[in-house]
Image (cartoon, rainbow, N blue to C red):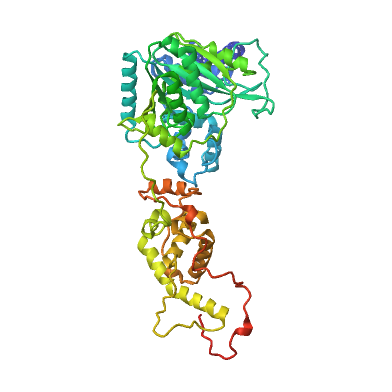
Amino acid sequence: MAVAVEVEESLAAKFPVLLPHLDERQRRLYLGSEARSLGHGGVEAVARAAGVSRQMVAAGVAELEGSGEPLGRARRPGGGRKKLADTDPGLRPALLALVDPASRGDPESPLMWTTKSVKHLSDELAAQGHACSPQTAWRLLRGQGFSTQANAKVTEGRRHPDRDAQFRYIAAQAKEHLAAGQPVISVDAKKKEQAGQYARAGREWRPGGDPVRVRDHSFADRDGGHAIPYGVYDVGANTGFVNVGTDGNTAALAVESVRRWWQLMGKDAYPDAERLLVTCDAGGSNGWRNRGWKAGLAELAQETGLQITVCHFPPGTSKWNKIEHRLFSQITLGWRGRPLTSYDVIINTISAVTTRTGLTVTAVLDDSPCPTGTQISDEQMKDIEDRLLTRHEFHGEWNYALLPVPRPAPEPGPAPVPARRCGQDTLNQPALTGMDPADLTALAAALEIPFRARREQRRYLRQGRARQRAEGASGGGSNRKLDLTGHVLALRLRQHLNLPGHVIGALLGADKTTISHATSLTQTLLAALPASQHPPAAPPPGHRLRTLDDLRDYAAGHGIIIPALNEAETPPHDTLTTRATPQTHLNLERLPSDNNAPSWS
């Protein structure tokens, strides 16, 4: 029996109101229930009234009768549009190839020099023929375990073999001092800060839409100043002291900061102290190589009567110094979102730093000059080493003590007699010349004949006749201070280490003018030598060596000892150099007119 037209019109009016609020399965079941209630012909009538296919209504009737899938799914498994990763098997491998960390070193990688955002990734995939939206790229990466990662500061660089042993040594020294009631301080300089209306990282509570107005750039103001907070953290008392310098970050500021801490806080907290342990990093104004740091502490030890022991952390491990995470981190938090407009703001914000563990901080302004370039002479350092400084047995360059009472001065020994020149065997080393010693000696032997031929030719052109020798005399010539091996050494020292002429002259016992002539002549002879006879040479090391002391330090690092040389006693000129005769103008009239003149090609 056909369904009445009035019933079908009633359903057509009711369906548009209810169906938009149902999901796919609910619509299917509802239409199936209406069709079952109408009986025969209900499926066709409901399909026409709802504007859907007859198959959808019939599927709803079947589900109500128990032949469909269980409740909880809107579609049967496998229904709906397939995922792109399934329809395009090459999409996922192409995406992983773009974000693979190993591809960062491949210059052919498409996204080598761009940010790997999902927008760039989807664009590159589309260019490779894989249709993919940024949202799909994001879902695929998340499904493969990827996430956006920031850099992790964990690489420490080259590790010293005694790194951990030095940590343990510092801990033992600190434990021993604290157990004896002696002060232990951790010192370091914080990053230099500009004083003025400059932006600071971080946020602070303020009325909405009313941020603090600061400069739109961070260039230093000519009229403004800067602050260098040098901190002293008392490990035993959990107190901080910050000396805010206004000049340079030098050893003078570091020593003055320790002095002020002792005068303002230390001597009252430790009235019976006889020793002081200072832990610091290995570089900067308080580095283990800094002579001004040692000289300043030696003076401070005599002023205070304290034996000052210094323990440096190994290179590259300054973040393990307690002041970094006990004091400086708290100062940075106190400065967040607050422009350091003046020195008063800097001092007051540092002094207001406290922690729940009881940290208190005192800050003072230090406007005393701390100029850079202060030199501590070798004689001053030798006196400090001999009388005021005691190095520990374990890494004495990192661990040492400054004495409050100087030791008696040692008896002066005989002054060493400076050598006139350095031996050629000492200079003929690969670290100094860039050549194997045997290759350099062979090169000098190969230049012997061209060197003699050039010398005889120049003499013939200058005197107009061949050399006159006594009967039976050898052809060795006069005794020269700079032989041909010395010529080649001078040239290689100049090319490999870029040494100045006066330094090479001091090494070889010659004047810098002689060295200049020797290097020019040797270079000319080498240019005429066949390339097959040129021995291999190492590239220059890139060090800037300008003095004998620089050369000694460099050579010592390669196990070469350069003896003391007397630069003042180098001869005024080499016997290879004749009197100043113009070499650019030849007296052609003195040449013989016949063809008996020897040829020196």
x, y percentage for residue 583?
60, 73
Residue sitting nearer the eye, 291 or 135 = 291
Which residue is located at x 34 percent, y 20 percent? 174
Residue sitting nearer the eye, 64 or 84 = 84
Which residue is located at x 34 percent, y 13 percent? 181
x, y percentage for residue 536?
41, 62
Q: How many marks?
A: 0
**Rendered view: 236 above or below 133:** above
Residue sitting nearer the eye, 147 or 576 = 576
x, y percentage for residue 150?
48, 28
x, y percentage for residue 515?
51, 61
Q: Is residue 245 left or right of residue 398?
A: right
Q: Is residue 509 visible?
A: yes
Where residue 115 sits, quadrant-wise, is top right
Q: Residue furthest bottom?
A: 594
**Rendered view: 336 above or below 253:** above
Q: Is residue 219 left or right of residue 304?
A: right
Q: Is residue 357 left or right of residue 256?
A: left
Where residue 160 sits, quadrant-wise, is top left
**Rendered view: 572 above or below 312:** below
Residue sitting nearer the eye, 392 or 492 = 392
**Rendered view: 600 above or below 487:** below
Which residue is located at x 30 percent, y 31 percent? 393
Q: Is residue 315 visible?
A: no
